[in-house]
Image (cartoon, grey):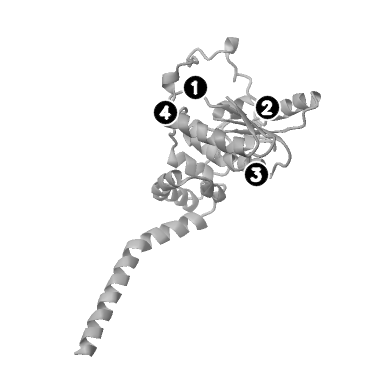
Amino acid sequence: MQKEQRGKMWRTVVTIIVSVLAIIMPFIVVFFVGICTPPQYADTYYGELHDMYARLKQTEGKKVVVVGNSNVAFGVDSALMEGLLKSGDLDYTVCNFGLHGSIGTKVMLDLSRDYIGEGDIVIFVPEISNQLLSLYFSAEEAWYALDSGMDMFWEFGDDVRGTLVGGFFGYVAKKYALWSGGTPAEPSGVYAHSSFDERCDLKNYERPYNTMPGGVDVNNYIEFNSSQFDSGFIDYVNEYYADIRAAGAEMYY
């Protein structure tokens, strides 16, 4: 009788183990495919984010960190800023830290938060639009950027990591399809990793027509309307500000 009961117990245990493996095996397979497949978006515009992140992490001494979106990528000349500061006897390294709106303003704050230290200055210049003045981010496009450096994943809070995990299957499917087809994602014109120099400034691509007559984009006027700011975003920026102030830094909007 006891032998029969033990047999039933083991059959139950084996059934449970097999069932659990059947459930989690697809996740394990997708995880290893995603990790083992070589980067496929490294040459695209998104590939620059890890360079910006690595440069910020590795910069020693006092820094001016300009945080924003593509307005920073296209509009900031960190070498020029650094030179002007030095001419005034201000010894700062300037870090360009803005790339693409769909990656999300919150993501740029998350990636920079722990690397702002004593004496640093953060200049926060998000683009003026409802989407970029909120906690929005695109998991799909964030994965394109993470493709060049998975270490960035651990800089995010549980909320962002959870959303990224939810988008991992779609990202891996696209990444694997590109790799198996031998056709990594290709850059498009100025939107390329190679357009940035070693300082993460967008200087390696001529932009003779990338100008605004009169200095104004007539299709996208700036409106200083507080209703554009999402309340959760305001709270988050204030938390970021409190954290870097505690680290001995200053922040200007």
Q: Residue 16 versus residue 49: which sits nearer the camera?
A: 16
Image coords of residue 207 (percent x, y): 63, 23
Report the residue marked by disc 4: 231
Identify the residue at horizontal 51%, vertical 32% (top origin): 237
Q: Secondary structure at mark 2?
A: loop
Query: Which of pointers 4 and 2 indicates the residue nearer the eye?
Result: 4
Of the residues under marks 3 and 1, which one precedes in the sequence?
3
**Nearer to me, 146 or 185:** 146
Mark earlier in primary sequence (3, 4): 3
Determine the residue positioned at 65% across, 34% down.
249
Q: Amino acid at mark 2?
A: Asp
Residue 35 position (above or below residue 71): below
Q: Residues within 10 Å of mark 4 (few under 14, many from 20)?
A: some
Neighbours of disc 2 within 10 Å: few (<14), some (14-19), many (20+): some
Pick whichever of labels 2 and 3 is earlier in the sequence: 3
- In the picture, the disc for residue 77 is 2
Q: Amino acid at mark 1?
A: Ile
The numbered mark, 2 or 1, whose residue comes first in the sequence reads 2
Label 3: how many Cα within 10 Å (few below 14, some 14–19, many 20+): some
Kind of element beneath mark 1: loop
Per the model, the C-alpha gap separating discs 2 and 1 is 20 Å
